[in-house]
Image (cartoon, rainbow, N blue to C red):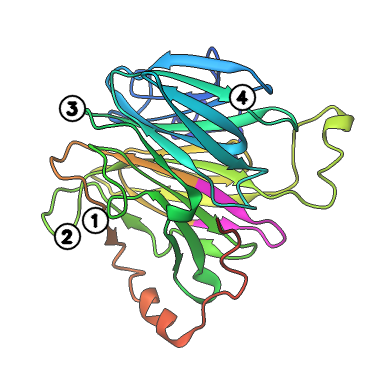
Amino acid sequence: MGSDVTRNEYYLPAGAASSGPYALDVNPASDGPLGYSSLRIVELAPGEKHAFNTGDEEMFVLPLSGSCTVVCDGEEFTVGGRDNVFNRVTDSVYVPRDAEVTITSTGTDGPGRFALPAARCTNRLPARYRPAEDVPVEIRGSGNSTRQVNNFGSAHTFDADRLIAVEVITPAGNWSSYPAHKHDEDRPGEESVLEEIYYFEISDGPGDAGAASRGTTQRHGFGFHRVYGTPERPIEVLEEVRTGDVVLIPHGWHGPSVAAPGYHMYYLNVMSGPGEKREWLICDDPAHAWVRGEWERQDPDPRLPLSSP
């Protein structure tokens, strides 16, 4: 389990979807199950630049590690990043479709890693900088289902044409994306059609600092992720996930995402779909929806928020 990418087109282990300048490149044109959403990750040495045209996609420039400057059609933004996804909420920049963009890594402590969550869109909105201090941090769930959501690009906190993107941090031993839910039917006011990308990172353990000296990038930290469908629309994913892994969800129930004890889990969610209205409306699996009622009798996990601006 977790290594046979030819058996499951929905699970891409780290490195399986690299292309050209990108350590990860998943998009509707990459011969996969997506029709609207994209995610690319570019790694840049200090002072190194990456220039591109956004084409028919709107996107965010989101530092996973390091800081950068972003120039969009001649307008420059200074983006304060972070050491890693667990220690700080980050600045970001929204860039519109049909734009010329250059990212320059400004860090001094090794390469920066920058995520480009994106979606095909119609309308061209202005480029905008969002400081970390402006990002609403939500504590969702309770008990061992408590997680942190950084709403840098959610439908209710940021204006975009099609793209929805958030970060989720699940403390070690907790469950998130639970109860399992879906958003693959057009039911006005109840459920919206959105495909989704999950990109994972897992915190290091005590033995991970020496991985590079051992000639490996493998880390000990891990978690699990589940996706399942219906007889009419089958999909099946149950994978051990590690840093750099991706799960693609064109439809179906998804959850839970489970962080192993000792290791915090991060995932970047990227969503988009065909609906005229940009909204995140979900339907819980009826078999497990009752679990939400249990949260009223539990306290939120005191470890959260794990990071802040």
Query: If you read the primary sequence from the N terminus, does the residue marked by circle 4 or circle 3 appear first?
Result: 4
* Residue at figure coordinates x 31%, y 53% from the top left: 157
**Answer yes or no: do the residues labelled 4 and 3 have beta carbons within 8 Å?**
no
First reached walking from the N terminus: tag 2 or tag 4? 4
Q: CA distance from mark 4 to mark 3?
A: 29 Å
Does 45 appear in magenta?
no
Q: Which residue is mark 4?
A: 43
Q: Secondary structure at mark 2?
A: loop
Disc 3 packing (10 Å; few <14; some 14–19; many ≥20): few
Amino acid at circle 2: Glu
Amino acid type, label 3: Thr
Which badge, 3 or 2, is on the more N-terminal residue?
3
- Specify the segment rendered in magenta: 257-267
User: Which residue: 30% across, 53% down?
Assistant: 182
Q: Quadrant of the N terminus?
A: top right
Residue beneath disc 3: 122
Label 3 or label 2, whichever lies nearer to me, is 3
Q: Amino acid at mark 4?
A: Glu
**Residue 120 appears in the rendering:** yes
**Callouts 1 and 2 close, C-beta under 8 Å:** yes
Mark 1 or mark 3, which is nearer the start of the sequence? 3
Q: Is residue 259 magenta?
A: yes
Residue 163's image quarter?
Answer: top left
Picture coordinates of residue 288, whole percent (x, y): 36, 69
Please tell me whether mark 4 sits on a helix, a strand or a loop: strand
Is residue 4 in view? no
Residue at label 2? 190
